[in-house]
Amino acid sequence: MRALDEHRAAALALAAPLPAVEVGLADALGMVLAEDVRADEPLPRWDNSAMDGYAVRRADVLTVPAVLRVVADLPAGSPDEPALEPGTAARIMTGAPVPPGADAVVPIEVTDAGTTTVEIRVAPEPAAHIRRAGEDAIPGDLVLAAGALLGPAHVAALASTCRSSALVHRRPRIAVVSTGDELVPPGTDLRRGQLPDSNSWLLAAAVTEAGAVAVRLGPVSDDPAALLELLHSLDADPSVDGVVTSGGVSMGAFDVVKAALADSPGVEFLPVAVQPGKPQGLGRLPGGTPIWTLPGNPVSSFASFEMFVRPALGRMRGLAAVERPTVTALADEGWRTPPGRAQLMPVRFVGDARVVPATGRGSGSHLVARLALAEGLAVVPAEVDEVVVGASVHVLKVT
């Protein structure tokens, strides 16, 4: 059997950052930056006021109270540059450029305004309440690094550099195919032996949450020829960047994915030393499209996606860090682990730093309804035979 970490590396090796595209700022949120962004100009561009008040020559107000003649009103955005002569001041609003000659701003709260004059009651410190040009960044400073996942603050930073667009990696478009004659669309009246197709919805949602675009297909019947035709059509579609399948990869007589791809030299099927999710497959279709074939039990599909597919999608997106956050927690309950295999136990948190299995029924790979209780996956190494109460476990946070 292949070790968990070895298979994770093989799954990640199928992925590479997708080509960069230019998008407007309105579409940049959630995208991954494909180039460094540096300041072209000082930020801010000019000395400006940090307060509503009066721009003054400090030498005029070292002794207070001092009465100055008001020679200008400067709202934010004003292009005016009234030079302050001795004995004068300018009323100024937050963000307005500081006029030539001024070297401090006095907050309005410590002044008394007349019709054409202002009385300054408190002497300001040198450069009081003045934001200096270049205080945020100077030309050449790195504002955002390539690989940054663009959130609201990143979009604001782009706008502050006067950019109306960003060069980003496009989102990968991933086809999701669930297989099995027993699967029917949710909402269908079930006859004996049938199951609602939850996997295609699970994996499509996981693909979307991972920042990619999901193309949900299925369920597909257990017909190897029909599945192979579908996979070849996806392989030939230039808009499809990868394929994820669920089901049909184990040792049974009707494992359709293995049967359909049996003659594809670029795809391998093998057991991985992990529970749940032992039967796995991955590789490239003849046209080069990456494919990850996951087991069909819902918890196995979920855990396999988190371990093997999500990091690959992160790399396709151009992310610098492709892993989910991992925390160390203490087991509030003990549980058994499978001999010789790593375990991915769905857990929920009890308090901030303790976990218990998400369901009293353990990590059963079919427990899809109870999977919704999971807040993380406890990744237990293969050499651990039992997790005892109080043991430290590494938890991959999934919510």
Image: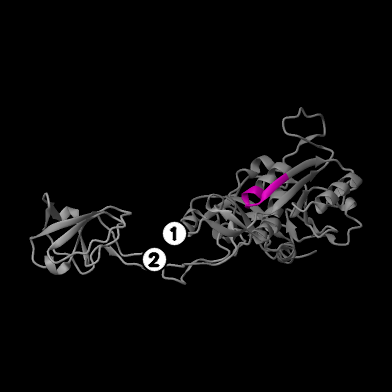
Residue 374 at what x, y percent from top left? 61, 47
Q: Which mark is residue 339?
A: none
Would residue 205 appear left or right of 27 to someone viewing this image?
right
Q: Is residue 161 left or right of residue 84?
A: right
Which residue is label 2 attached to? 136
Please determine whether, in this image, residue 143 is positioned above or below residue 359: below
Q: Dot 1 corresponds to which residue?
A: 160
Say what secondary structure mark 1 lies in: helix
Check the image and name the residue furthest to the bottom: 140
In percent of the image, x 13 and y 61: which residue is there?
A: 122
Q: Residues within 10 Å of mark 2 (few under 14, many from 20)?
A: some
Depth check, front residue: 269 or 350? 269
For the residue marked with disc 1, what is the amino acid? Ser
Query: Which residue shows up at 56% across the image and 58% down it?
Result: 166
Give SS at disc 2: loop
Q: Residue at x 73, y 58 (%)?
A: 274
> Mark 2 to mark 1: distance in Å?
10 Å
Q: Confirm whether residue 220 shows in the render.
A: yes
Q: Is residue 217 above or below residue 6?
A: above
Q: Quadrant of the N terminus?
A: bottom right
Q: Is residue 180 left or right of residue 132?
A: right
Q: Position of residue 58 (x, y in %)?
A: 16, 67
Between disc 2 and disc 1, the foreground one is 1
How packed mark 1 is, by other alpha carbons closer than 10 Å (few <14, some 14-19, many 20 or more), is: some
Q: Is residue 348 left or right of residue 125?
A: right
Q: Which residues are magenta?
A: 207-215
Disc 2 to disc 1: CB gap under 8 Å = yes
Q: Is residue 322 above or below residue 248?
A: below
The reply to whether the magenta stretch includes residue 398 is no
Counting residues from the start of the chain, the first of labels 2 and 1 encountered is 2
Residue 356 x/y as whole percent = 58, 51
The image quadrant of residue 377 is: bottom right
